Image: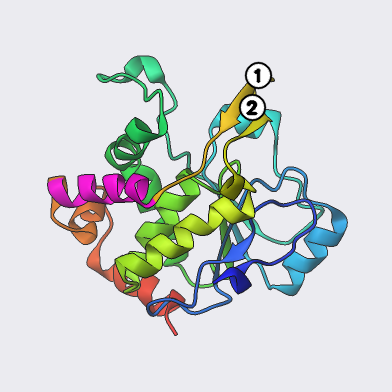
Amino acid sequence: MTDAFIEIPGVRNFRDAGGIGALRRGVLYRSGSLHTLTEEGAGRLKDLGLRTVVDLRSAFELEVWPDELHGLDVESLSVPTLPANREDLDRPWPEDQASLYPFMAETAGPSLAAVVRRLAQPGATPAVVHCAVGKDRTGLTIAVLQSLLGATPEEITADFLLSNIGLGLDQGPTPYIDETGSERISRPISAELLDSALTWIHTHHGDLRTYLATHGVSPAELDALYANLSA
């Protein structure tokens, strides 16, 4: 599946999320932030026919590192995966990856619903979904979309784990500078992390369709999503 990677100058971890289940290639991409996208990279995105950019980052991340689109004719949609106000939560903010994934499953329903609704609209694709590096927030979002399009858990996990290669994490943790200017450590992802998020959804809602329905996604919108993204 490493042939899914596409070189887009200035963008990390860019790849086609399709080719599994009924999700066809060339309609849904995933990546890291576009804030260092070069003009050459923008030209390659134009060649892909990109119509929509879905940004899962926080408002602060967008303020510090806004996407650089070089005049691309796309619609940008900001739908933060994680809650904006930590002080409004009735639970601790996750301090590690193991607690982050079920936390995302619990709190990202509105974001996931917004992504589904946008991609269900006519003319929304091809689209790219991204966060900062395209690993955690993007990983869960794409996994949900792939599952809705009939991909198997094994296929979804294999695609999810490609981010370790795309980000050089297959050799272990790497340091990085976050949006506040602080040095932090980026850690590899594992099948267990994604499974913990999807298990939370199935345990609390039964299945993805019911989970999304609780956040306002209608059966007609899910049918439209399938029609837009399927082969």
Which residue in the structure is indicated by mark 1? 182
In this rendered view, identify the residue nearer to me: 212 or 98: 98
- Identify residue for label 2: 178
Between 223 and 20, the one lying in front of the other is 20
Q: Is residue 204 left or right of residue 75?
A: left
Mark 2: which amino acid? Asp
Q: Among all residues in the image, which is located at the extreme bottom?
A: 231
Quarter of the image where one finds residue 180:
top right
- Give yes or no for contact between labels 2 and 1 (Cβ–Cβ under 8 Å): yes
Residue 168, image x and y in percent? 64, 48
Query: Crowding at label 2, few (<14), some or many (≥20) Cα neighbours within 10 Å?
Result: few
Q: Which residues are magenta?
A: 191-203
Circle 1: residue type: Ser
Residue 80, percent from left and from top: 48, 39
For label 2, the SS is: loop
Percent coordinates x, y for residue 223 in the rendering? 31, 74
